[in-house]
Amino acid sequence: MKDTKKCPHCGQWSHWNQNPEDRCEHCRNPLDPITLNRQQAKYDLQQQEKQRFSLDLIRINPDDSWFIRFTKKVGLGFQLIFVAIITFFIWFIAFVAA
Ligand SMILES: [Zn+2]
C-alpha cells in the first residue's frame, strides 16, 4: 500500500508504507519519529527485562562425580524451564502492551 506523509523536518511530502522506520525522500529524516522513539523505548525496556532475568546456566564439568553431575543436570533442567517461562512472560507482556 502506497501512502504519503508530510515530513516533520522539511515539510515535503514523501512516500511511506506506514512504517515508522521509513525515511523522508528529501532530507532522510524519520517520517514518524514519535512512533520510532516509542518503539525504540519499548525495545530498550525489553532488553533490560531480558538482562534482569538472564542468569548463568550451571556448568557441568567432566571431573564432577556422578552425584554432582546428576544434581547439576536437575538444576539445569529447572533453569531452562524457568528461562522458558520468563521468555514467554516477556513475550506475552510485549504482545498485550502492543
Ligand atoms: Zn524531510
Image: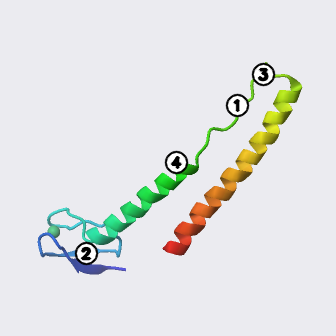
Q: Can you see residue 39? A: yes
Give the secondary structure at mark 1: loop
Q: Mark 4 and 1 residues: CB-CB less than 8 Å, in contact?
A: no
Name the residue rendered at 25%, 80% in the picture.
Answer: 4
Q: Residue 59's spot in the image, x, y percent?
A: 70, 31
Q: Mark 3 and 4 residues: CB-CB less than 8 Å, in contact?
A: no
Q: Judge from the rendering whether residue 64 lies leftward or rightward of residue 30; answer left or right.
A: right
Q: Residue 28's spot in the image, x, y percent?
A: 19, 62
Label 1 belongs to which residue? Answer: 59
**Circle 1 Cα neighbour tier, 10 Å, few/some/many (<14 / 14–19 / ≥20):** few
**Disc on the earlier residue, 3 or 2:** 2
Name the amino acid type tagged 3: Pro
Label 2 belongs to which residue? Answer: 15
Label 4 belongs to which residue? Answer: 51
**Disc on the earlier residue, 4 or 1:** 4
Name the residue rendered at 12%, 75% in the picture.
Answer: 11
Rounded to the nearest angstrom, the CA distance separating label 4 from label 2 is: 38 Å
Give the quarter of the image for residue 86: bottom right
Q: Judge from the rendering whether residue 38 lies leftward or rightward of residue 88; answer left or right.
A: left
